[in-house]
Structure formats: C-alpha cells, structure tokens
Amino acid sequence: MPDYAFFFSYASADRITPAPDALVTDKNDYLRIFLDDLNQEVQPRYPDGGFFDKKEFRGLWRQELGDGLAASRVLLPLYSKNYFASRHCAKEWEVFRLRSEANRPGGPDGTPNVILPVIWDMPPGIPDGVTTYQYMTNDDYPVEYKQNGLYYLMKFKRYDDAYKKFVYLLGRQLLTLADEQGPEQIREVPPFDDIFPPFPKKRC
C-alpha cells in the first residue's frame, strides 16, 4: 500500500510540455521538475514521495485518482488563475477540505492542517473560503517567491539559492504536516463524480 507524503494538485494548463505522459522530463516542464526536486526532500522519510496525476483522463483514471487521494497525507495545491478555473482541481481540493473538517482541531488555533498551498503564479483573486486554508506560511521564504510565485523562481531563479531555499523550506513544512497525520492508512474518499467543487463560480 503506498503512503504518499502529499497529493500534487495542479492545473494541467500550467504544465508546459510537448508530451505530458513522457517518461523523460522536458527541460521546460517546470511542474514536473519542481515535483522531482521536492520529492528529493521528502522521500528519505516517505519513499513513495508525492502522488502525481498525469491528467491523462483515460482508462481507470478515476480509480487511480481516488486511490491517490486516499493514500495521500497532505494536499499540495499549486494556486494559479488556471487552478481556480478548474473544476477538476476544485474537487481534489474539496476532498482535503472535508478531511480538514473531520480532523478538527488541528494546527494552531484549530486551523486545519492537511492543505499546504503553493503560489504557482499570482492569481487575480482567491475564491471565498479557500483563504482559510493558508496553514504554515513561512516568513523565511525567498522574497522572489512572495512577490512573484513559484513559476517565476522556476523560470528565472531555478539554479539560484532562492529556489533551492524555497524547496528545502517547503519540504520541511510538508514533512511536519505529513508526520502529524499519524500512522499509514487508506482514507475515505467520496466518489469523484459526487464531489461538489467549491470553485470556479457557476457561470450564468
């Protein structure tokens, strides 16, 4: 049974690659490069690393996705304009929001502690209710990340200390949250088609 430290939740529109299911990571596939770098931080303690859904939408993808959600300890959502426009991402996010409610109280002042957001690029606005789940931000994050988001770091600072520091600090936070989830287990996940997504807003 896998025991994923985190579920890597991202908008497929944010992934730059000519072949999303390629075995070799393209040099411009920043999302996958970031995932690989973050896995290096967590895999010494959680060998399965993070669950990565290639968004292929074929075959048994619902079963595979459900298994990934059930076996993942923490949600790592990459917030962006595209993320908050995706009902698919919203459903992944909602699974962990429901788990957060079931886990209360958790974290300081009862803040739920199974969602650790990352800003991919600066979205024009974060939907109501999502801002509640901003657990464990870090004052030591590089200023370049705080001002511009992770995509900026990947594109312009990937070989600099700023990016390396961010990945290290995020990995430490992620391990803390993953450890707090207790023993390895398979968690209950509602059928994906039955999940009501909290975003995007319905259009008339």
Image: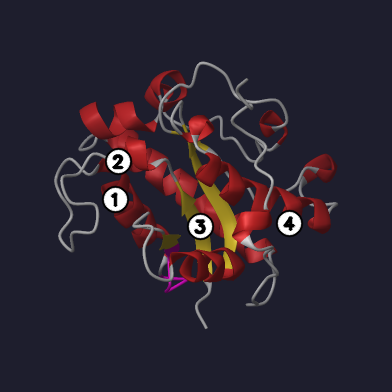
Determine if the magenta segment contains residue 45.
yes
Which residue is rendered at x = 52% and y = 44% of the image? 89
The answer to whether any part of residue 155 appears in the image is yes
> In the orientation shown, which residue stands out farthest toward the bottom?
1
Q: CA distance from mark 3 to mark 2?
A: 16 Å
Q: Earlier in the sequence, mark 3 or mark 4?
A: 3
Which residue is identified by label 1?
32
Q: Answer above or below: position of 26 versus 188.
A: above
Label 2: state its secondary structure: loop
The circle drawn on residue 99 is 4
The magenta region covers 44-50
Image position of 137 (left or right of 113): left
Q: Amino acid at mark 2?
A: Arg
What is the basis of the colouring in this image?
secondary structure
Which residue is rendered at x = 52% and y = 59% of the image? 6
In front: 54, or 30? 54
Label 1 crowd bin: few (<14), some (14–19), many (20+), radius 10 Å: some
Name the spot of residue 23 as percent of width and height, x first: 18, 64
Q: Amino acid at mark 4?
A: Arg
Label 1: state its secondary structure: helix
Name the spot of residue 58 as percent of width and height, x first: 36, 63
